[in-house]
Image (cartoon, grey):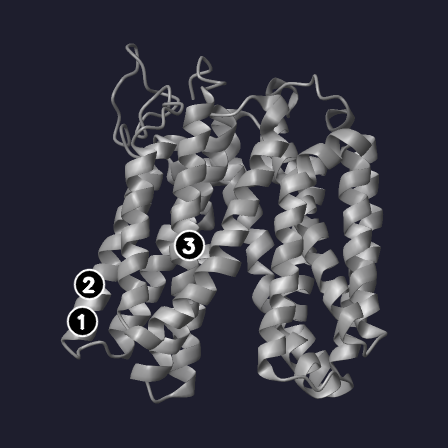
Amino acid sequence: MSTDTAVRPSSGYHRVLGAAASSAVGDGMRFAALPLLSTAVLDDAFQVSAVTAATTLPWLLFALPAGAYADRFERRLLMVLADLLRAAVLVLTVLLLAADRLTFWPLLTSAFLLGVGEVLFDCASFALLPSVVPKDRLESANGRLFAVQTVGRDLLGQVVGGVLFTVGRAVPLVIDAVSFLASALLLRGVRGPVPESGPESGPESGPAAEPGPGAGKPRLLADIREGVAFVLRDPLLRALTVSAGVINAVYLGQIAVFVILVREVLELPDAAYGALLAAGAVGGVIGGAVAGRLSKAVGRVPALVGNLALMGAAGLAVAATDRVPVVAVAYGVTGFALMVWNVVAVSLRQTIIPDRMLGRATGVYRLFAWGTMPLGALVFGRVSASAGPRAAFALGGVVTLLTCLPIAYALLRDSRVTDRRKTTEDAP
C-alpha cells in the first residue's frame, strides 16, 4: 500500500462510522429475523440450525483468503462490493419468499452468501480504519465504531427486527438490503490507500521481468502463507490471537447456557432473559465509549490485563449467586470488559502491523478468534448438561483468569505496547 495516505481527514472516518451504523442495524434485524423466518418456512429442526450455522461457516472457510484480498485490492471498493453482494442476496431472498419458493437450499445458500459478505466487509474495514484515522486516535475511533455496532446490532436492530417480522416476514429483510445500499453509498466517498501494485503482480513483475509460464497469475496462496507466518512468528500477535480465541470461546459458551441459567436456576420468565442480555449490551456500549480514554489513563497493559481479569471475576460472580441484580451487574461488567479488551487489542494490532499486512493479519486473527466460538458452545453446553450452568460459568471464569498470565507476559516483554512512538515499521 502507498504510504502517503497514512492519515486521512476525519470525514473519511465519519463515513466509515455511518456505514458501520447503517449496516449494523440491518444486521441486527437479520440476526433476529432469519431464525424466525427459518422456523416459519422449514419443518425440520436440523435444517433450521443448519441455516443459522451457515452464516458463521464462511469465517472458517474464507477468513484467510478475504484477508489476503483486503491487502491486494482497494479496501473501500471491497467493502462496497460486499455491501452490494449482501443487498442482492437479500432482494433475491425476498423475491423467492414472495413466490413461495424459499425452501431449505435457497435459504441455506442465502445465509451462507450473507456470511461471505460479512467476512469480506469486516476484514477490509478493520484494515482500512488506520488509513482514515491518526494513530494517536485509533483507540477512541475503534471505541466509537464498536459502540455504534453494538447499539445498532445488539440493541436497536434485534429488537426492531423481531417486531418487524410480526408485521411481515419480508419487512426486516427489505430494510436490511436498504441498509447495505446506504452503507455502500457512504463508502463511495471514502479515500483509502490503494495497493502500490496490482493484484496480479508478484516478485518477478517490473519492466525487466521476463514473462514466464506462471506470470500474471495471482499469488493468493503465497499471500495467505505470508500472513499466517507473520502472525505466528510475532510473540505478541500470537498471544493476542490465542487470547482472543479463548475469550470468544468462553463468551459464546456462557451465552449458550445463559438461557438455561435464567430459566432453571434464577427461575425467571423469558422476557427477563432478553433484559439481562440487554444489560450486557449496555455494558458494551459504555466500554466502547470510554475505552480510548481508559487506555490512555492507565496504559495498555493494565487496560488489557485488568479487563481480562474483570471478565473472569464476573463469570465467577454469576456462578456464585442466585440474586438477579448481581447477575445483571455481572453481565453488564462482562460486556464492558469485553468491549474495552476488543478496542485496545484491535487498536494495538492496527498500530504494530504494517499497512500492507493488515488485511491478512486480520483474517488470521478472525479465523482463530471466531473459529473457537462453536467449540466453546459445545464444551460449555456439555458442562452445563452434566454439572449445571453455574459450573459452566465457573469454568469460564477460571479459564479467563488463567489467560491473564500469558497475555500479561507477552505484553510486558514487548516495547511496542508501552512506547506509543513506535511505528508500524518496527513490526517484524
Could you tell me which quadrant the N terminus lies in?
A: top left
Against 144, residue 329 (above or below) is: below
Q: CA distance from mark 2 to mark 3?
A: 20 Å
Q: Residues within 10 Å of mark 1 (few under 14, many from 20)?
A: some
Give the secondary structure at mark 1: helix
Q: Residue furthest top?
A: 208
Left or right of residue 237: residue 44:
left
From mark 3 to mark 1, how far is it between C-alphas?
23 Å
Asked whether 373 or 210 is in front, the reply is 373
Q: Does residue 105 appear to the left or right of 62 in the view shown?
A: left
Q: Nearer the viewer, mark 3 or mark 1?
A: 3
Q: Earlier in the sequence, mark 3 or mark 1?
A: 3
- Location of mark 3 (residue): 25
Q: Is residue 72 above or below residue 423?
A: below
- x, y percentage for residue 149? 50, 49
Give the side of residue 312 with respect to residue 177, left or right.
Answer: right
Q: Residue flagged by tag 3: what amino acid is it?
A: Val
Return the residue nearer the eye: 30 or 395: 30
Task: Give the residue type that dot 1 points to.
Answer: Leu
* Residue 261 to residue 214: above or below: below
* Residue closer to the observer: 248 or 39: 39
Residue wearing tag 2:
92
**Element class at badge 2:** helix
Q: Quadrant of the C terminus?
A: top right
The residue where tag 1 is placed is 96
State the SS at label 3: helix
Coordinates of residue 124 in the picture (x, y in percent): 43, 39
In the image, what residue type sits under mark 2?
Leu
Q: Residue at x 21, y 74 (%)?
A: 97
Label 2: few (<14), some (14–19) or many (≥20) C-alpha neighbours in 10 Å: some
